[in-house]
Image (spheres, rainbow, N blue to C red):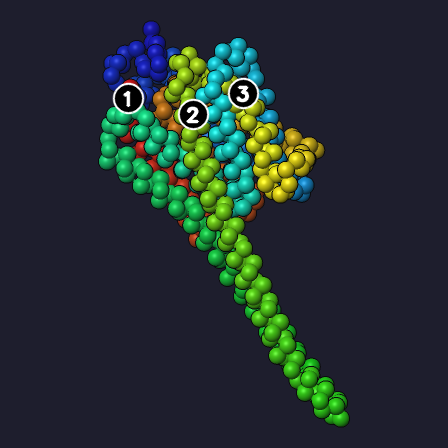
Amino acid sequence: MWTCIDGICSWCKADCPASSHIMQCLSITAFTPCTNYIGSGLGLALLAALCNGSFSALAKCDRVRHAQVPPYIFNLWLCVGVCIASAPIAYGTAMRCASVQGGVSGLLFVLSTGASMQAIQLIGLSQAIGIGCGTAALVSFGWGLLIETGTVAQLPRALAGMAAILLGIAGVAAAGALQQAITSQQQQEEQQQGSRPQLGMAAAGADVQQLQQPLLADADAEQGTDPTVAAAAAAASRQQAAAQQQQQWRRIVVGLVLALATGVLGGLILAPMDYVGRECRGLPYQAAVAVGVAAAAVPVTYCLHWLQAGKVGASLPLHPLAAAVPGMLAGIIWAAGSASSMVAAATIGLAISYPIMQSGLFVAGLLGIVLYGELHSLKPHLVYWGSGVVLVLGIVLVSGAGRQQ
């Protein structure tokens, strides 16, 4: 009788590495409890990737954009959705896993998603999620390296993976910058082409006026300066375009910083779980995180709103008609992805499940590019997708460099 204990087939030795015993189960056995167990774990990892890459896309839906819902308000409704979706887990565990550690994780989640929503508004879904995923993988690995000594079995592989992750993050950021440069160049060319006919028409108009009004020499002279006036107007237009371009680049820089902050905070969300009992780790810990989210969401949202409004005590513009449904749906999708990722990690091991889950950046990239047209030139497309592949490869290397416990 085939059995599985902690994801290890009964015929496999106790010290068999996770990456090898799963491949052996899939290649040697046909339809056994082991293969079904592993297949469900892979399926849950794929579901987690789909959820992780898609829940943030609702922040850019037409209803939210037309109502101009602030990112922190959408994030508040997202937190409500997380609490609703996690309520069955909390009920099943009788709230016995609620803890200070869960509260810290909940605060980190609220701050991470809040930064993510703002970054999506500034630099787009594909870049914000791509950079966030890579940074989260790097931070979570670094945390494990600092806290649990001796967790790295293959240092060269770990270093290569970290380098690949950094390269992938830089590539994803460069794709957006390249698209912005291409767009700015196209706008400048259009402005230059539009200004030339105006200059020609102004010069022609001045010549006609000089012929029709020979007695008004002074007026003719003034009319003869029309091309100069038009040139000055064109220069002012170029200055305005340069100022707008500078403002756009400033938005990109702020968005990149927020995307990095999303990854740093997101990579630490589950770090406090190392300090709770084993019975409260994994899926039960999500209920503890939801309690922390419920406690932190409103205060964090009020603080962000007061900073935006510049006045303490300003009421929240909740936009319930526009933001409630998509926001709560986003939170439910995230909770489903989080639960799937925890079960998948317990089933097939983190070394295999984590890279699959982080491939959600491709889902986010596809949604951002197809639905919202964030990248519309060939070179940025090539840079983005190539960098995404490098990033996931780095996550694979890092995940496989850990020592099996």
- Quarter containing the N terminus: top left
Q: What is the number of callouts on the image? A: 3
Residue type at mark 2?
Leu
Residue type at mark 3?
Val
In percent of width and height, residue 304 lies at 58, 37
In percent of width and height, residue 41 lies at 41, 21
Residue located beneath label 1 in the image: 404
Q: Residues within 10 Å of mark 1 (few under 14, many from 20)?
A: some
Residue located beneath label 2 in the image: 270
Q: Give the quadrant of residue 298.
A: top right
Could one spot residue 150 in this view of the protein? yes
Identify the element where label 2 is drawn. Answer: loop
Q: Give the quadrant of residue 230.
A: bottom right
Residue type at mark 1?
Gln
Q: CA distance from mark 1 to mark 2?
A: 19 Å
Residue sitting at x 68%, y 84%? 222
Q: Residues within 10 Å of mark 2 (few under 14, many from 20)?
A: many
Identify the element where label 1 is drawn. Answer: loop
Q: Which of the pair 35/337 is nearer the observer?
A: 337
Q: CA distance from mark 3 to mark 2?
A: 14 Å
Q: Which mark is residue 291?
A: 3
Single out the residue that lies furthest toward the front: 312
